[in-house]
Image (cartoon, helix red, strand yellow):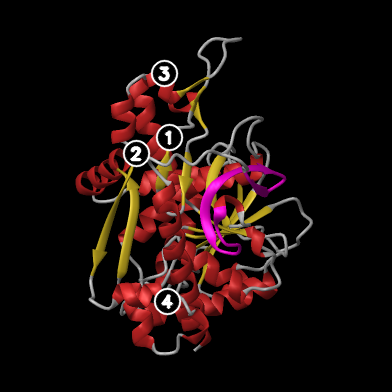
Amino acid sequence: MAVAPAMAPVAVAEVAATPNDGLLRLALATGARGPSDATAERLLHLVQAIANGGTVFGTSQELVIHFLGTAAEEPMLQGLAMDVADSTLPLVRGVSASSDSSQALKNCDVVVLTEELPPVDSDLFPAALKTFKLWSCYLDVASKKTAQVVAVDAALASLLAHLSPSIPKEQFTFVSRISLNRAVSVLAKKLGVLPNKLANVTVWGIEDVDAMGALLKPLAQGKTPSTACEAINDLAWVQGALPTVRRTMHHARTMAAFQNRNFPNIGHQSQLHARARFCFRVTSQAVKARGKAVATGAKCSMVAQCKAIADHLRDLWQGTAEGEWTSLGTWTDGSYGLDEGVLYSQPVTIKDKVATIVPGLTVDPLTLRGRLDDAFELLQCRQEQIKVAASD
């Protein structure tokens, strides 16, 4: 009896990389933590958030999606690619998966890094740094020079910008939208309105939320917008939901190392470790509590995180409405007394994928001014130490 030939591997749809074919090429990259159910679930949620319905890039914009990960993750990513292909999403023309960054990043229009860079003193950091340095080389030479590179971590976005000099650094941003969305959720519930009735909530630095300038859109045509604070009419609640500071010192010498900001002279890895151990968190009480409740109850916040990434990309592609702004991690330009050249979440308007920092906003002294500079120093320190580590 003849033996049937072995079944060939299932072919995942692929489209030849021709830059002028009208397709938008999107790379979704993992990190260096290895294959896991959480990584797979995050990527699938992200595909659904981005590709289902056309609200991010446009209702007629067809996509080619590339999953990029480590060699250990490649079988998992191949399975995800087949699952996405079998979903027959109407705007997904092709999908592929690989650990070969030279192919996955070729002619990409958008690159999304879906995982954070581990702390410098973490056991995972050396492998992650090696992976991201390799990817940044191909990002620099293989992706389009107009590519938008989006990370969920300011330090990672800064590192990639540093290692990919042929792509303008203004095209490297990080996502602070999850804090904004959570703040909007809290405000909308308090006001009894839909979230899309709120605008101009600002996220500074990492996740320091300023709701004092939030705009409540009129519920009826022709009505004048009011501020959310006026509509709430409960100053005690507003101030109670605004930022507080929690500092944790893991090491007695950390503060001295942090305050010694002579970054070019950092040479010893222990100094990097000492700075990395300074944990400074700025957040809003209500938003912080909400994030903790989600993490405790659902063990993750993947849907919210993926929606935040999709919102970030939509803002870049669709721009902001007249009179409104959003918040994302972009480079400081000297506004608000902050030194230039640090990735930092700020209020921005967006047009033609260019983010412009909103000038002249009043920084409420009750909530932000005393801490805005501290958060800035933390981000500056973290980004500099990553660059030093990458140069070793």
Report if residue 355 lies within the magenta region: yes
For disc 4, the marked residue is: 128
Q: Which residue is mark 1?
A: 211
Q: Mark 3 to mark 2: distance in Å?
A: 16 Å
* Sequence-wise first label, 4 or 3: 4
Classify 10 Å Cα crowding around label 1: few (below 14), some (14-19), many (20 and above): many
Identify the residue under disc 3. 231
Q: What kind of residue is marked 3?
A: Ala
Disc with the residue nearer the chain's start (1 vs 4) = 4
Toward the right, the furthest residue is 20
Residue 221 percent location from the top left of the image: 59, 10
Quote the CA–CA distance across marks 2 and 4: 35 Å
Circle 1: residue type = Ala
**Image point 67% across, 52% down: which residue?**
24
**Badge 4 amino acid:** Ala
Mark sitting on residue 242: 2
Label 4, label 3: how far apart the Cα atoms are: 47 Å
Q: Secondary structure at mark 2?
A: loop
Task: Judge from the rendering whether residue 141 lies leftward or rightward of residue 276; answer left or right.
Answer: right
Q: Position of residue 159 (x, y in %)?
A: 53, 72
Which numbered disc flags the more N-terminal residue, 3 or 2? 3
| Residue stretch rendered in magenta on the structure | 337-357
The image shows residue 190 at horizontal and vertical percentages of 33, 24
Crowding at mark 4 (Cα within 10 Å: few <14, some 14-19, many 20+):
some
Q: Earlier in the sequence, mark 1 or mark 3?
A: 1
